[in-house]
Each structure stands twice: as C-alpha cells, then as structure tokens.
Image (tube, grey):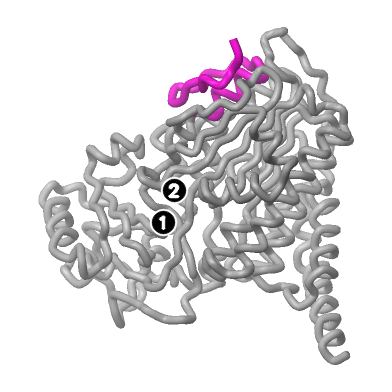
Amino acid sequence: MSSLMYSTAKLLIGTAQFLIQDVPHAFNNALDSYQVVARTPRWTGQEKAKHVIFINLDAISPEQFEEIRASSPMINEAVSSGAISSRMLGTFPAQTSTMHASTLTGEYPERHGIYTVFEQSLDDILFVDQCSVTSNAAVNNRVDCKSKKLTDAAFRRGLTTGSFGFCTTHQDPHISYNIGDMTCTRDAGIAGGIFKKMSTVFALKHMIPAMIRQTLLAPSTYTSPEMIVRLLDDGYVSAAEDVILNHRAHFVCVQQVGYDLASHCFGTRSPQAGSTLVRYTEHLERLIRASRMAGTYEDTVFSLMSDHLIFDIDRYVYLNNLFWRNGLISVAGRKVISCSAYGESVGKSFLIHIADKKRSTKSRVMELLQQNQDAFGIERILDWSELDSLHAGTQYDLACTAVPGVMFVHNLNLSGDIKRDRKIYFKAQHGQDPRGNLTTFAIWGPGIKRGYESGDMNGVDIAPTLVHVLGLDFHCSGGKVLDVFEE
C-alpha cells in the first residue's frame, strides 16, 4: 500500500508541476499554430506512390534490426517484400540531428550546416559541466538547417505532412502536423523540458495521453529517464497513427528514440535498453496496421533507417585539458582569457577549432594529439583531407575519434584529465566516425524491388529516393536515387 501511495503522490506532484509550469508555455503559440490548412494534392503521374512513412529506429545496429525482423512475422514479411541495405554510411559526426538533416535534404553537413547538438558560447563549452543531468539538458538540438528539405517540395505540391520527433522540422511552417524533438532547458531538467518544444495543441493531444498511459503501465518510473523513453516513443507513434488514419497524410516522419536514450542512461546491455527494442517492434507494427486500416497501405512506401550506432562508456576524457595544460587555453576563474585552439565534444568524436587560424598552432595541436594519443584515449586523428572526404566542411580544422569505452568531454576539468566513476551520467554514447560503423536502411511498397539487397549506400541518398517516390520537384546535390525501383 505504501508503495502505491508513494507512486500516486509522485504522479500528482508531477502532474501539478506539468500543469503549472509546462502547459502555459506550450499554449503560448498553440492556438495560432494549430490552424492546419486543408491541402489539395496535385499529382503529376510521375509518383510511384502517394504516401510515404519514414521511420528512424534510433541507434540500433544491423544485427538488432535482424532481431526485430525475427521477432515479428509482420515486419519480416514487409521488409522481405522490398529492398534492404545493412551498409548505410551515416554522417560525421554520428548524431541524430545531423543525420536527420541529411536524410531530409539530401545534403552533407558541409551544406546543411548542422554538425552538433550544441549551441553554446566558448565560456559555456569550457565551464558548463557537459556530463551533469541539468547542464546537458540545457543544450538544444539545432533546427536552423541551411538547406531546403523535401517537406518544402511536398508543401508546394499540396501534400499533407507530419513530423514527430525529427530534429530539423520543429516549428517548420511547411509541416501540417508537427511535434518537435526533445529539447530541455537548464532550469527545467529532462522531464519538464520535453514539453518546451510543444508548439501545438496537436502535440498536447497525443503526448499527455501518452504520459498518462505510460505512468499507469509503470508508475515506479514516473519522472525517471525510463519514463521519458516510454513517453516519447508512445507519443510520437500515437500522433503518426492519427495523421495516417484520420488525415491520410502523404508524408510522415516518425522518430523512435527509446534505444538511444535508454542506452545513454543505462547502457546498451541494460534491461531498459532491451525493452525498448520490443517497443520498437510493437510501434513499427502499429504504423503498418494504421496504414492498412486507412486503406492506403497498397499506395504507401515505407522507408526505415537507423541513424547511427551507440557504444558503452566507462570513462570520460577531458581533451580540452590537453590544450589548457599546454598554454593554448588561458583561463581566470570561470572566464576564458585567451584561446588559440579548443574542441567540442560530440561524444565519441572531438571537433577541433584552431581559433587563431595560425598554421603554427595547428601544427602544435597535431603534435600534442599525437604525443598523447594513448594517454587520452584517441583512436584516430582526422586532418582536413579526411574531414573533406567525409563532407564535414570547413567549420572544424581537425577531429579525433575515441577508443572503445571513451567519451570525450569538452568542459575543462581542472582536477584531472580522465574520470572513471560508476555514477557517470552517460553509460553509452555515439558521435563516432561512421566508417566501419554502418547502419541499416530498408524500403518497401509499390514500385520497389522485392527481396533486393541494395548494398553500399549513404544517408544522403534517402531524400532523393523519397523525392522520386512522390514525384516531387526537388534537387539534392549530395545524394542520388537508389537503385531500388522496379524497371
């Protein structure tokens, strides 16, 4: 009884906090943004199908996708009827926001401009603890994509669109039904911060019931990271089901972030991460059923991907400490006095700026990295030529990738360069070099080759392929249409 009372009290307190703090914020722009204009699609006869459902199963490996197929006859039958690749090269760095941008624009980061999930000043990079719960929650996913998205072309064609959890479509006026990705503010923490990006009544319509459902299913997890994992995936799928069934949406993006978040919080081998794979399976089945119930399945192309892999972490390496200890960064208290070079962490990679633009500084940085490669857990050092081959652009001068078990951290830790602690916030991390860490892409539906192994491909190939499905007028300079269509 005491346990039930405790869970009930937590639920009531959390609900009160949500109603007082989050709902007014969410409704600030809600009434204006909920006026969804009825769309009249204009078809040209060039389309392969009139509906596309694009799903990201965040962070799963090709092997885990095969486990999902093996556990679900429905999913296995669907995937087997189309084309699949377990050799998809993702973006560098391997981040969800970067990959989302590339898959919706058909452009590399050098053109769409989304590299990291951080929007911080140099003082914040060096002095805000990247690995505490609240400060990590303070960094927002970037949404200022510089390139046009295929959803823009869909809008011009009069198609109804939906996007649920995709980083680069938040508050996009060309999306008919939209729930932005999770973003938190420094004072709200993870639980409260989820609702800060809810710009529409539509979002609240699905996320509040999802919160109630998941609380009833697992009251002991309320306000915990596990609760957030359950809430997001359930809410995103519920919203997608709604627009598929009731609005016959023509292009729908659905993010499933559970395995990624659970791995970050608990590790890739944790029961919490394992249970999210079961939910990935259930939610994918729900989307297939929704399309069938809507009567649009035979005219729908399903496209599915995993944006990146994720790896367990047992130590933090503070790589900016190397520059600070060698005079390239000077500080006084919590203020930067001078800085010749510094880096930004994206987990398993470290993106380095030569701030003073001097060739001698770049040579010094390279020398320090080479001399301290083993001590600081550096697996590879990427110079400008390798960054160029990865289409990472000119925003960064050098980069490092981490050995297994290491996560790079960009804030200074004046008490030590390496931290091993059983209480570390991140239990797993991504951001690695995508080469050698390939992911999965699958596509099925009308006009798609059956039982086809499509082989090597790139994440930027997804946008032009989906553009070809819908017959849109949209040019992608980075990717190409995949050879997955029947003659």
Q: Is residue 372 above or below residue 58?
A: below
Q: Main secondary structure of the magenta part?
A: loop
Q: Is residue 56 magenta?
A: no
Q: Nearer the viewer, mark 2 or mark 1?
A: 2
Where residue 66 sits: x, y (%)? 58, 46
Where residue 346 is drawn, which disc sits there? 1
Q: Amino acid at mark 2?
A: Ala
User: Can you see residue 188?
Assistant: no
Hey, which residue is sitting farthest top in the picture? 45
Where residue 95 sits: x, y (%)? 48, 49
**In which image quadrant can residue 374 be found?**
bottom left
Q: Which range of residues does the magenta coloring cover?
A: 461-487
- Residue at 87 percent across and 32 percent down: it is 294
Q: Position of 294 compared to 335: left or right?
A: right
- Callout 1: SS: loop
Of residue 459 and residue 141, the one placed in the foreground of this image is 459
Q: Is residue 117 above or below residue 291?
A: below
Spatial distance from mark 2 to mark 1, Cα to Cα? Answer: 8 Å
Q: Which residue is mark 2?
A: 94
Q: Position of 398 compared to 266: left or right?
A: left
* Dots 2, 1 in contact, CB < 8 A: yes
- Residue at 38 percent across and 58 percent down: it is 348
Where residue 185 sits: x, y (%)? 60, 64
- Residue at 77 percent across and 38 percent down: it is 288
Q: Position of 244 compared to 115: left or right?
A: right
Q: Is residue 466 above or below residue 323?
A: above
Where residue 250 sits: x, y (%)? 75, 27
Of residue 338 and residue 350, the one placed in the foreground of this image is 350
